[in-house]
Image (cartoon, rainbow, N blue to C red):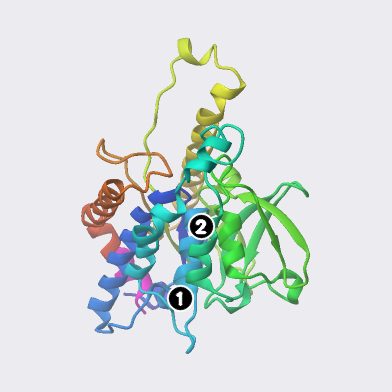
Amino acid sequence: MSSENNNKVRILSIDGGGIRGVIPGQVLVYVEQKIQELTGNQEARIADYFDFIAGTSTGGILSCAYLAPDSSKRPKFTAQEVVNLYMERGDDIFDIPLFHKLRTAGGLTDEKYPSAGIEEALEDYFGDVKLSELLKPCLVTAYDIKRREAKFFRQHDTRGKSRDFYVRDVARATGAAPTYFECARIKSMTNVVYPLIDGGLFANNPALCAYSDVRKFDKKPTAKSMAILSLGTGYAKKSYSYSEAKDFGMIDWIVPSLDIMMSGVSETVHYQLKQIYETTQNPNQYLRINTALPQDVNAQMDDASPENLQALKELGTELSEVKRTDLDAFIKNYLIR
């Protein structure tokens, strides 16, 4: 391992995808365990081996969890404990009380899920931790529907309380997927109000946002000086025939539009970064890990049934095994110094 590789800025990026966050979460269980094996340090955590973490929606929640500090300013959660947020609380987050289902006509007249479940889970995991207290620089995406602009939550850019927020609110905002949850209304530490929705609408794959942000660091690193691990949440490309789509109305286009928008954004970012890194001497500094979803996994972002959660976890484990050679090389060459 060269000294040049030791000096890379190590970036982790995690896509949006609702409950499918179990997949990248499980890949990072493998990464953390491999680091522990190679270093002989059982206390090694994801936050110790990345310099910058970016996430959108479920990836934003994961990012916050890896960087959350305990009382001694060490990572509060292991990678497996982060996955457990989904395994143990997924059915609470994606739960529809009968009254809510009746009142909203199954989600047609209001958000599909009440926000109480996700807010309670985020409160339990993050408490009163502030964005400024996260352990490493990070970027979490959301969209401001009032100001009509992207909102980037940055741990490294919380100068003054006006840019600082409770992490539970950051996580709530980035996960406010339209039609699933009502938009988030959060406040900064100076009580400035932000009405926000899921950043997946413009940056479902936040890897290029991370790249751009790191470019502004003090030493102005270029692609050659960055190593990026980008994790997807799986994909199932549903086809829409012309004969079917030509007669779609406004309601008919809601689900296909969200599906195409989010997957299209992720694919475009991967294409752009791949092109960027192919101009460097070592394109392997950029590693994208994603997978097609098999038939036994429900592609819907909100299927938190025990059967689907287990299938997602097994898929993440299987993906880690399939990509073991690439992951091991990335870990050895760029993460361990």
- Residue in view at x 73 percent, y 76 percent: 159
Percent coordinates x, y for residue 263 in the rendering = 47, 38
Which residue reaches farthest front?
99
| Residue 225 visible (yes or no) | no
Percent coordinates x, y for residue 99 in the rendering = 52, 42
Percent coordinates x, y for residue 36 in the rendering = 27, 78
- Residue in view at x 75 percent, y 77 percent: 160
Q: Is residue 332 magenta?
A: yes
**Amino acid type, callout 2:** Ile
At numbered mark 2, what does the secondary structure look like: helix, strand or loop? helix
Q: Is residue 255 left or right of residue 160?
A: left
Q: Nearer the viewer, residue 79 or 232?
A: 79
Vertical comparison of 337 with 188: above or below: below
Mark found first going from the N terminus, 2 or 1: 1
Camera-near label (2 vs 1) is: 2
The stretch of residues the image draws in magenta is: 329-337
Which of the 4 quarters of the picture holds residue 10? Answer: bottom left
Residue at numbered disc 1: 7
Residue at numbered disc 2: 118
- Residue in view at x 36 percent, y 74 percent: 78
Percent coordinates x, y for residue 131 in the rendering = 61, 72
Vertical comparison of 32 with 17: above or below: below
At numbered mark 1, what does the secondary structure look like: helix, strand or loop? loop
Neighbour class for label 2 at 10 Å: few (<14), some, many (≥20)?
many
- Quarter that holds the N terminus: bottom left
| Residue 158 visible (yes or no) | yes
- Residue in view at x 40 percent, y 39 percent: 300
- Quarter that holds the C terminus: bottom left
